[in-house]
Amino acid sequence: MRIGYACLTYGNITSNFKTITKKTLTVENLLKVIDHNLNALEEIIDYNIENNLDLFRITSDLIPFGSSSLNVIEWDKIFGERFHDISLKILDSGIRVSMHPGQYSVLNSPREEVLTNTIDDLKYHEKVLNLLGTDNSSKIVLHIGGVYGDKKSSIDRFIENYNKLENAIMDRVIIENDDKSYTIEDVMHISSKAGIPVVFDNLHHKVNNCGGSDLLWIDEARKTWLKEDGVQKIHYSQQDTKKSKGAHSFTIDLGEFKEYMHLNFRGSLDVMLEVKDKNLSAIKVSNFVRSSNINKLEVEWSRYKYNILEKSPKNYNSIRQLLKAKEQYPIIEFYNLIDISLSLESTIGNQINAIEHVWGYFKDIATEEEKKKYFGLIAKFKEGRNTSNGIKKFLKELAFKYERDYLMNSYYFSI
């Protein structure tokens, strides 16, 4: 079982994507932002390789206005070498990338303008995946679209429009059930007519249920995947209990995931997590699925420890004790303590305690000016005249200046 996540690396300081508005759209800005975004994508691929994450959904915003005539530059040619460099890493590592057009790409729209824009958008997504040197196992995920007052006609229109697509796009498109209009049964019907691989989404099925177990529909969807389509993919997410039905949870609860994985799946699966904390949950789940080495948890602890210290010194000490049993792999207990801690409100005393631990990396090497600034920020914080964010920002600057990799790799400055 391979695990992945979508679009962004949560808590990663430098791998953010940028965008452009129509107001700021110039050739110069396009060149700068595309260059930045490709650098960010390469950083994310490097990150995924380092952390053994096998699936990644590339943001549709990689190339601003990529499917629009407003983007007048030949970005595929200008940045061809950059795409090639990234493609080598993707191919060498075996990472499976995909894309998922946004809500305005609707293949069954009755409006000609919307359909034209959707096809242009699909061409853009196919071009990106092609430039990255991927084969047809790197897919473009689509929802069916709207109902428009007549579900049968809308389904027929989707199939008709799909069959008009270029073969290169058809070879990449896969379809999934949604949480409002099209159940997994509807999507399987469309697949039977058009020969499109189906992605089963567990939370969408829970919300928009047509009967039948997850295991049943995963088995049925498996039959729609041909060898050239790659390993069957599913989308997995959990309900945020504090939000409306269908809202993704902030993080993956490993206990709940463990129960789900006991469904006795009958074949290989690629599992794309749809979760707010992105890569953090992907690493958590990957460590559960693929590892029994406590060193993996110790690496995770080095990333989380100061976040936990500022939330709950008690849980901080509990996790330290948990990791002392080197012959064990207490992964469920470890992540439960982390998840519980991160959900807590932090007191000023606990925040200062964590800040002082981090300051310990610099107290003997900081300049007099830096020491003065630090103690001034701390004094204001204690008096309630600022938040800890300003102190963290300053400590992050010191971490980069003094090349303290341990801190730069932690989540303390990011989550």
Image: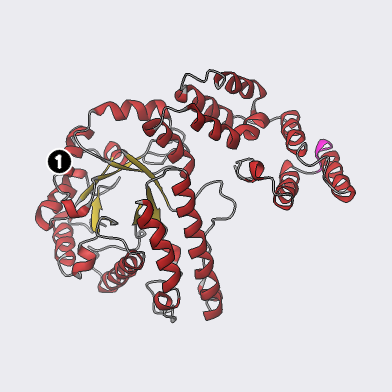
Q: Overall secondary structure of the magenta stretch?
A: loop
| Quadrant (top left/top right/bottom left/bottom right) for the N terminus | top left
Q: Is residue 192 left or right of residue 228?
A: left
Quadrant of res 206: top left
**Residue at left 49%, top 40%?**
280
Q: Residue at x 24, y 53 (%)?
A: 175
Indicate the quadrant where residue 119 lies. Answer: bottom left
> Is any part of residue 407 visible from this angle?
yes
Q: What secondary structure is found at the residue carrying circle 1?
A: helix
Quarter of the figure that contains the C terminus: top right
Q: Nearer the viewer, residue 286 or 182?
A: 286
Which stretch is magenta? 381-385
Whether residue 243 can be seen here: no
Which amino acid, mark 1?
A: Glu
Dot 1 corresponds to which residue?
A: 220
Between residue 35 and residue 24, name the one nearer to us. 35
Question: Would you say 267 lies left or right of 61 here?
Answer: left
Q: Position of residue 388 (x, y in %)?
A: 73, 41
The structure residue drawn at horizontal position 60% and vertical position 22%, both measured from the top left corner, is 320
Residue at the image position 44 percent from the left and 48 percent from the top: 49
Query: On the picture, is 375 further left or further right than 266?
Result: right
Is 33 a magenta residue? no
**Residue 223 position within the rendered picture, expressed as x and y whole percent measured from the top left:** 13, 45
